[in-house]
Image (cartoon, rainbow, N blue to C red):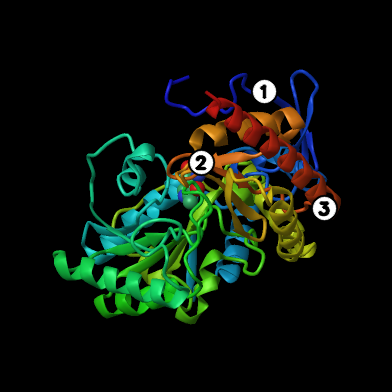
Amino acid sequence: MPDWLTLYYEDPVELTHGEGRHVWDAEGRCYLDFYGGVLTTMTAHALPEVTAAVREQAGRILHTSTLYLNRPMVELAERIATLSGIPDARVFFTTSGTEANDTALLLATAYRRSNQILAMRNSYHGRSFSSVSITGNSAWSPTSLSPFQTLYVHGGVRTRGPFAELSDAAFTDACVADLEDVLGQAHGGAAALIAEPVQGVGGFTAPPDGLYAAFREVLDRHGILWISDEVQTGWGRTGDHFWGWQAHAASGPPDMLTFAKGIGNGMAVGGVVARAEVMNCLDAHSVSTFGGSPVTMAAGLANLTYLLEHDLQGNARRVGGLLIQRLRAVTAGLPVVREVRGRGLMIGVELAGPDGRPAPHAAGLALEHARAEGLLVGRGGREGNVLRIAPPLTLTVAEAEEGAELLGAALRRTQDAAEAERQP
Ligand code: PMP
């Protein structure tokens, strides 16, 4: 395996099995899972409905390619097209979020006959050549070469930058003015703006509601498409909304949205939804071998059905609301915790040093301490100083309370260690 793959923990965890919101490692230790492998375990580990659907489909046919139809693929495409809110929608399945964004960029550049892309600062959209080259942070982009001319826009991050202290309305106005300024200075005719409604890898930071509606007015004047990267924010994760873009709903749906991660509950399902006019703009014919494979589609269908039937969006809102309160309570008075923020079951805990500067070292310690307490959380943010909490959407109140206590204990140990390190 390459050196550049991120591997959590000094002594990496080897996972052997999971159930509900818990996973076990090769040494038999049990962890409460507050990360779901970067939001991929959307509903629950070993959800019987998904397992049964996968078994059943695997026993029927594994053959895959888009040259032939299979029923789970057609059904899932129909369900997602309806749920997307995009009129006259078409769905193309991929096997990752990266490939979904790659496809969206291909469609946008072909449709608009332009390779100019507007992207948000601090953004992350995947690891292919095209997606790393629009990523707004060199830490997540190993190349400065690019098939695009990328223009970066303010708005995804509230906690830093020239607009950090502004009110929501003033922040939005400043970002819109910045977008106008960027467009004014560029060669005209950008293809698309791509944005995560809540930045994921960027540390679970969100702009004020309505920002993308305000952007949309500017984009529409120029005919520029809006791509909402819903890889982390889709499927009710943010509680109040099924898609992240709906926090900006005055603008109506985006022209395209991309999804992946949770929908397959661990199986490789991603995709793009676009208006037919945009989706069908490609001249050349194409085929996907693994996109839309019957087994992954059966998993996605069973998982989506479970999510909707059990109102897991509502659960994300209720239990997520409680979790954020509990996390604020257990971390109150810990100077290392600068902010606990989030929506639904997408919560970031930002760590800072006594000088207010980002504290990535403390985040590394907190990750280890949390593991020692029996809790898995993620990490993100531009400096790697944000703990990311995104448990499976079936999280119970008792588990939320337990996890908050465990993280509180881990952060108290982190605070003590940070203070001890500062002693002369
Ligand atoms: N978009 C976003 C917002 C993501 O968070 C990620 C993965 N972290 C991707 C795209 C890429 O998805 P994948 O890892 O499935 O390629």
Q: CA distance from mark 1 to mark 3?
A: 25 Å
Name the residue that disc number 1 marks.
14
Q: Position of residue 313 (x, y in %)?
A: 70, 63
Q: Front-most of 346 and 270? A: 346
Q: CA distance from mark 3 to mark 2?
A: 33 Å
Amino acid bearing label 3: Thr
Q: CA distance from mark 1 to mark 2?
A: 31 Å
Residues at marks 3 and 2 touching, judged by CB atoms closer than 8 Å: no
Q: Is residue 206 above or below residue 399?
A: below
Name the residue that disc number 3 marks.
396
Name the residue that disc number 2 marks.
353
Q: Front-most of 178 and 84? A: 178
Q: Residue at x 44, y 70 (%)?
A: 254
Q: Position of residue 169 (x, y in %)?
A: 43, 77
Q: Residues within 10 Å of mark 2 (few under 14, many from 20)?
A: some
> Does residue 401 appear to the left or right of 93 in the view shown?
right
Residue depth check, mark 1 versus mark 3: number of the one nearer the observer: 3
Q: Is residue 239 above or below residue 126?
A: below
